[in-house]
Image (cartoon, rainbow, N blue to C red):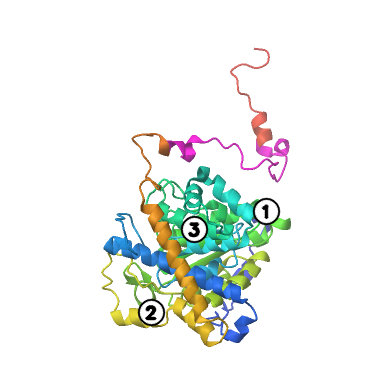
């Protein structure tokens, strides 16, 4: 209880100084040869494949939104598309070490994070687990499309799972009933719980407090895994994000909670710092922090273990995530990561991009994370360029197939509310009764009969007459 914490005026009124620690900035500087000792050739290629898949997926969406076409296929998508071309290394790096017990929450610009987390989950799950997920999720609607498209082909289950992920996400964005949530979530609210992908949020900073609740759920229910809150630098101007940070860093987790409950939340605030909040430049214009990582110093004495990392290098992000996950496993969370990145497209395809110069975009594109990763490994003699070119072909083929399947009204129809007026009502949470989340005894600080309030209520008379009438 609070009264256990004695407020001593002699201590409170004592003169002194509040000191801060240095905040690391872009400290990952390993050479290609050093990295070769940490990653296998297959792992390097997987990282490239994941980045390239996200880039092509976003490029496809941009093409569909601006030209109504992609790779010879025509389609009009009237829905929103907040794209993250340029941010692929940040997305893949944050997801690389995560498994299905780890939850991610995102923003309106999270297609890349969804795909990265899904691809990471697929790489870690076995064939039996993957098939069970695909066959059973929403009656296997998305899986049946992929299964039929691959009849007569002897393809590995993991390859089919990648097609399932790409198709399910795209069908959701295109509002098709075969999407991961029947097309009702769309671009800004897509999610896939079996892979640990929790709902994104169209409200800027909306995941800043929801993710804290998820981390608290994991803590008090002793659940494995961590929670990653992927939000943009613009969200630092939103109250719920600050509220979430304060709640996540409460002293009581260390000072008052006891036993195995003692310690911080398993939560990373991963700020995808692409330099812009819609049309405002956060550093130098709309914010005052200069570096997002500085914010941690105002939250707790550990400064949220804050670090500013190079989100243009997927290996730098993986390195940071590995170290920060260790901090969370030691119950010393929360953590703040300032992940530097850049988006090539405007806030959305309709954005005229008048708030920045073509020269600025060009110089960032000259250092493109996908191309730089490929070039670095080729120049170091670790992987041939032909191996990367083969991945490019596979990625384009996979995205093209997903588009072809998702735009076909026979294969991927929209929800027919005329034929089934109560289709949405059937899947609303308000129609469910969930007496408890798990079949296990509740954790209680004291027995019900020993609770003073319960005893007090029991002594009250609830009737107009006593025992004698």
Q: Which label sits in the foreground, 1 or 2?
A: 2
The residue at which mark 2 appears reads as 365
In the depicted structure, whether residue 360 falls above or below residue 53:
below
What is the number of the mark on residue 222? 1
Q: CA distance from mark 3 to mark 2?
A: 28 Å
Q: Which label sits in the foreground, 1 or 3?
A: 3
Q: Residue at x 55, y 50 (%)?
A: 134
Q: Are marks 1 and 3 in contact (CB under 8 Å)?
A: no
The residue at which mark 3 appears reads as 163
Look at the image and tell me whether residue 83 can be seen.
no
Q: Residue at x 57, y 70 (%)?
A: 304
Helix, strand or loop at disc 3?
helix
Q: Which residues are magenta?
A: 425-453
In the depicted structure, whether residue 375 falls above or below residue 296:
below
Locate residue 333, reporting x and y percent.
Answer: 61, 65
Was residue 445 drawn as part of the magenta stretch in this picture?
yes
State left or right for residue 410 relative to residue 334: left
Q: Residue at x 29, y 79 (%)?
A: 358
State left or right for residue 449 relative to residue 44: right
Mark nearer the N terminus (3 vs 2): 3
Helix, strand or loop at disc 2?
helix
Classed neighbour count for the residue bearing mark 1: other residues with Cα under 10 Å, few (<14), some (14–19), many (≥20): few
Q: Which label sits in the foreground, 3 or 2?
A: 3
Q: Residue at x 44, y 64 (%)?
A: 397
Which of these two is toward me, 340 or 466? 340
Look at the image and tell me whether residue 257 can be seen.
yes
Classed neighbour count for the residue bearing mark 2: other residues with Cα under 10 Å, few (<14), some (14–19), many (≥20): some
């Amino acid at each position: 209880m609070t009264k256990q914490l004695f407020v001593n005026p002699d201590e409170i009124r004592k003169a002194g100084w509040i000191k801060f620690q240095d905040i690391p900035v872009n400290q990952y500087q390993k050479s290609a040869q050093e990295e070769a000792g940490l990653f296998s050739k297959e792992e390097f290629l997987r990282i490239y494949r994941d980045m390239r898949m996200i880039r092509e997926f976003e490029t496809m969406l941009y093409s569909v939104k601006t030209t109504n076409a992609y790779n010879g296929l025509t389609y009009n998508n009237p829905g929103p598309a907040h794209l993250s071309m340029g941010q692929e290394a940040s997305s893949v790096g944050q997801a690389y070490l995560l498994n299905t017990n780890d939850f991610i929450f995102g923003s309106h610009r999270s297609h890349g994070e969804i795909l990265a987390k899904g691809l990471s989950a697929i790489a870690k799950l076995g064939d039996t687990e993957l098939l069970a997920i695909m066959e059973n999720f929403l009656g296997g609607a998305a899986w049946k499309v992929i299964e039929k498209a691959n009849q007569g082909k002897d393809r590995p289950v993991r390859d089919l799972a990648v097609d399932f992920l790409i198709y399910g996400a795209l069908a959701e964005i295109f509002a098709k009933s075969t999407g991961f949530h029947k097309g009702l979530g769309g671009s800004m609210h897509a999610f896939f719980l079996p892979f640990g992908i929790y709902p994104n949020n169209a409200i800027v900073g909306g995941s800043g407090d929801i993710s804290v609740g998820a981390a608290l759920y994991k803590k008090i229910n002793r659940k494995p895994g961590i929670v990653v809150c992927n939000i943009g630098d613009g969200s630092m101007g939103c109250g719920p994000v600050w509220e979430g940070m304060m709640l996540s860093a409460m002293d009581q987790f260390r000072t008052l909670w006891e036993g195995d409950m003692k310690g911080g939340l398993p939560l990373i605030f991963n700020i995808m710092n692409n330099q812009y909040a819609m049309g405002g430049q956060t550093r130098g214009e709309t914010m005052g922090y200069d570096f997002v990582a500085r914010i941690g110093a105002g939250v707790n004495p550990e400064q949220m273990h804050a670090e500013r990392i190079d989100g243009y290098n997927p290996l730098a992000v993986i390195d940071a995530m590995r170290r920060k996950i260790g901090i969370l496993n030691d119950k010393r969370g929360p953590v703040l990561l300032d992940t530097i990145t850049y988006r090539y497209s405007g806030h959305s395809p309709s954005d005229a991009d008048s708030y920045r110069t073509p020269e600025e975009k060009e110089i960032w594109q000259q250092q493109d994370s996908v191309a730089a990763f490929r070039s670095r490994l080729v120049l170091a003699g670790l992987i041939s360029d032909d191996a990367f070119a083969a991945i490019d072909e596979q990625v384009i083929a996979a995205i093209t197939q997903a588009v072809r399947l998702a735009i076909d009204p026979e294969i991927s129809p929209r929800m027919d509310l005329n034929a089934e007026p109560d289709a949405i009502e059937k899947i609303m949470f308000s129609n469910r009764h969930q007496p408890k989340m798990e079949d296990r005894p509740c954790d209680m600080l004291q027995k019900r009969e020993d609770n003073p309030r319960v005893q007090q209520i029991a002594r009250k008379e609830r009737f107009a007459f006593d025992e004698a009438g």
